[in-house]
Image (cartoon, rainbow, N blue to C red):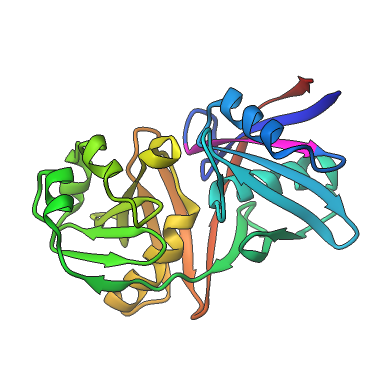
Amino acid sequence: MKIPMYQIDAFASEVFRGNPAAVCVLEEWLDDNILQNIASENNLAETAFIIRKEAGYDLRWFTPKVEIDLCGHATLASAYVIFKFLQPELSFISFSTMSGELTVSMETSGRLSMDFPSRIPTQIDITEMVEQAFELQPMEIWGSEDLMVLFESEKDIRSLQPNMEKLSEIKKYFAVIATAPGESVDFVSRFFAPNAGIPEDPVTGRAHCTLVPFWSKRLNKSQLHALQLSERTGELFCKDKGERVSMSGYAALFFKGEIYL
């Protein structure tokens, strides 16, 4: 069996930046163990699997360890593959996923715009476990599907060296987001998910489902410009739409080939 696979750098206009994701094009669903083994073999933050249907595509995402319910950069990468290689006549794609219908449209600027669910966080008490994990006093802590930790400045976010063992003890949430106001953008962030096999994710769409409604309310603006301050760095153009969030960015092809099973 040969499976077409593409590796795309998402939320970046050139390779070696943004967040790499693998996109595998299937004719039908394979056994979950095979999908997980492919993702583990790729050893990227996410491997996306897509199947073409009459009204769009089915889409699933796997980290090297687990299947997850929502992923932004691998969705962007999947849309890029479809627009560029599979159905270049399209300008709009609908994906059927574990998180419901997600859509991606091609903007005239060349950016891809994704429509995702909003995950509005609620404030919770600061815990000693979080303080120990970051060795820096947070200003506030908020929770949604992920734990969001607010720090004072962009400098704080850049300098974080979290204790992954301590972060792994935070079992209630899929991942931990660190965020602060930006110096040249509206806000900055970093994303840590050691329990999913991702110590630090380079650029994370799902995190912005929580970040965008939070910063939109705090800054009193719906259009937001964001940077994720990983080593590779990623740029996102976001909009708070109430129950939905839009995120747009560029993508670049790194390679295309085939998996042999």
For residue 184, side relative to residue 139 (left or right):
right
Q: Position of residue 114 (x, y in %)?
A: 60, 61
For residue 207, side relative to residue 169 (left or right):
right
Identify the residue at image location x=39%, y=41%.
Answer: 195
What is the quadrant of residue 36 in the picture? Answer: top right
Q: Nearer the viewer, residue 76 or 198?
A: 198
Identify the residue at image location x=48%, y=56%.
Answer: 206
Q: Position of residue 44 (x, y in %)?
A: 53, 31
Q: Nearer the viewer, residue 90 or 131?
A: 131
**Range of residues picked out in magenta:** 18-25
Q: Position of residue 159 (x, y in %)?
A: 17, 39
Tally the numbered discs: 0
Whether residue 62 appears in magenta in the rendering, the answer is no
Q: Quadrant of the C terminus?
A: top right
Instruction: Answer above or below: position of 192 versus 70.
Output: above
Identify the residue at image location x=12%, y=45%.
Answer: 132
Whether residue 24 appears in magenta in the rendering, the answer is yes
Q: Main secondary structure of the magenta part?
A: strand
For residue 135, side relative to residue 213 (left or right):
left
Q: Position of residue 100 (x, y in %)?
A: 66, 66
Instruction: Answer above or below: position of 179 versus 157.
Output: below
Instruction: Answer above or below: position of 213 versus 34.
Output: below
For residue 170, side relative to residue 67 (left or right):
left
Q: Nearer the viewer, residue 218 or 4?
A: 4
